[in-house]
Each structure stands twice: as structure tokens, then as C-alpha cells.
Image (cartoon, rainbow, N blue to C red):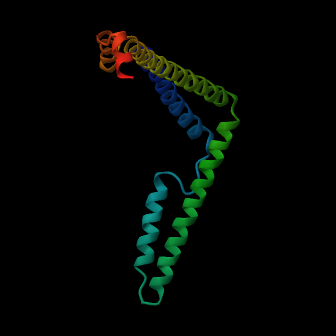
Amino acid sequence: MSEIQDSWKNLAGRVEAFGRNFEDRVDVDSPPSPSAGPDADADANSEATTASDTSGTDDQPTAKSNDAKAVLEDLGHRLTDAFDSVGAAAKDQAVRDEVRGLGTALIEALGTTFSAVGAEIDSMLKKKSDREAESAEEPTNADDQVVEADIIEEPGDEQSNG
């Protein structure tokens, strides 16, 4: 059982290492978005405050819709940057090698697990087969009664009945 655990622990360790390395690559590869960074949140908050401070009821719906548009545009830029970074990292040969290694580790873990499960099933089937063979060798009570009845009957008794 420890072989199975070891193979899955190996895979987990490799996945964690890959995640850390991939995150580092994405952070290094991605250019900072124009709206990203510590100042972006402050700018967004000041814009929202300015928009909400407008006087008059006619401007408030427009200010809210402008805020929503700005948030959606920012989200779009961030998603585009994220996908560009993932795409760039996926083209990196080192990332591809790590993913291949993860695939190999996954196959090894699954193979070890399925081998152990197969051996367990084989053992269970063998035990069942052995029990069935033992029960087939032992006579049942019905067989014992037939044997005893044959012994009690005498050959001359059958002729007198007919």
C-alpha cells in the first residue's frame, strides 16, 4: 500500500512544484496591465467616488453605467493578459517538459493503483474459487441420505414390490 501512496505523493509534489513554477513564469511573462497595480485600485475607488458625488438625479444612472463599463473593461483587459501569459508559458519548452513529467507521474500513479486493485480482485476471486471447490468436494446432507437409503435397501426388496 505504501507504493501506491508514494506514487500519489510524488504526483502531488510535482503538481505543487509545477503550480509554483508556472505561477512564477506567468508573473514574469505577463506585462503589467495598464489598470493593474496598487494604484489601479486607488484610481478605481476615486473614480467611483467622483462619479457617485455628481449632483442631480439625471447624472447618477449614467455614472453607474460608466462605472460598470469601466469595471467590465478592466476585467476584459485582465482576462486578456492572463490568457496571453498562459499562452506564452504553454509555448515555453520547460513548461511543456514539466507537463510531460506530470503526465508520466500520473500514469505511474494510476498504474500502481490499478495493479494493486487488480491483485486484490484476483486474490478475492481465487479465495471464492477455492471455497467453491472445497464445497463441491464435501457431500451435502441430501447426498448422505441417498447413500444411506441405498445401503438399507436390499436387492430382494425391490422384486417383491413389483
**In this picture, residue 144 sits left or right of residue 21:** left
Residue 10: tell me if it is visible: no
Q: Quadrant of residue 162?
A: top left
Residue nearest the viewer, comparing 33 with 155 = 155
Q: Is residue 113 above or below residue 59?
A: above
Q: Quadrant of residue 130?
A: top left
Residue nearest the viewer, comparing 101 with 75 = 101
Residue 102 location in percent, x, y?
58, 27
Q: Is residue 130 above or below residue 34?
A: above
- The mark tally for this picture is 0
Q: Is residue 137 above or below residue 65?
A: above
- The residue lying at 56 percent from left, 34 percent from top is 22
Residue 131: tell me if it is visible: yes
Residue 134 location in percent, x, y?
38, 12
Residue nearest the viewer, comparing 124 with 88 = 124
Residue 103 location in percent, x, y?
60, 27
**In this picture, residue 14 sits left or right of residue 85:** left
**In this picture, residue 1 sits left or right of residue 105:** left
Residue nearest the viewer, comparing 11 with 118 = 118
Which part of the image, by quadrant, shows the N terminus?
top left
Q: Quadrant of residue 123?
A: top left
Residue 55 location in percent, x, y?
41, 86
